[in-house]
Amino acid sequence: MLVVFLAAGCRIWPFGGASGVEEGIASWYGNEYHGRLTASGEVFNQEAMTAAHKELPFGTIVKVTNLRNRRTVVVRINDRGPFIRGRIIDLSRGAARELNMLHDGIVPVRVEVLQWGTGARR
């Protein structure tokens, strides 16, 4: 059956299985990367509602819930990362502010896919 998917040009994304939900640790990034190009080819804006993920296609829209305080934010995946073991998503400074995690730096989160992106670079 895998051959059928590959032959049809479909992509199989392992993220959260069929549910599209993942839990783990989030971190955030900002000043150091502000104005630089992201892996998707767009300029990083630390105040935009964006995030980096290791495998979700660029353009994917996800809801991120801070499991400590239940605050949520909706972000678009436009970069790759995080590259620190055990972390599942790297949020822009603006998104981290909405989750009230700037001071802590890292928090446990739930990431839920709302809309799958195409993975295409801009």
Image: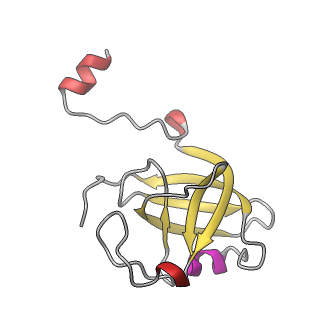
- Residue 16 image position (x, y, % from top left): 55, 39
Residue at x 44%, y 58% (from the top left corner): 80
Considering only vertical position in the picture, is 108 above or below 75? above
Residue at x 30%, y 53% (from the top left corner): 119
- Residue 52 image position (x, y, % from top left): 48, 62
Residue at x 50%, y 59% (from the top left corner): 62
Considering only vertical position in the picture, is 113 above or below 105? above
Locate the C terminus and report the quarter of the image it occupies: bottom left
Tell me which segment is drawn in magenta.
Answer: 93-98
- Residue 71 image position (x, y, % from top left): 71, 70
Q: Is residue 97 magenta?
A: yes
Considering only vertical position in the picture, is 60 above or below 3? below
Q: Nearer the viewer, residue 75 or 52?
A: 52
Visual colour scheme: secondary structure
What secondary structure predominates along the stretch shown in magenta?
A: helix
Q: Is residue 12 magenta?
A: no
Q: Nearer the viewer, residue 36 or 40?
A: 36
Indicate left or right for 33 with 73 as reference. Answer: left
Locate the N terminus and report the quarter of the image it occupies: top left
Quadrant housing residue 8: top left
Residue at x 43%, y 50% (from the top left corner): 56
- Residue 5 image position (x, y, % from top left): 27, 25
Labels in figure, total? 0
Indicate left or right for 62 with 107 as reference. Answer: left
Quadrant housing residue 67: bottom right
Q: Residue furthest top?
A: 1
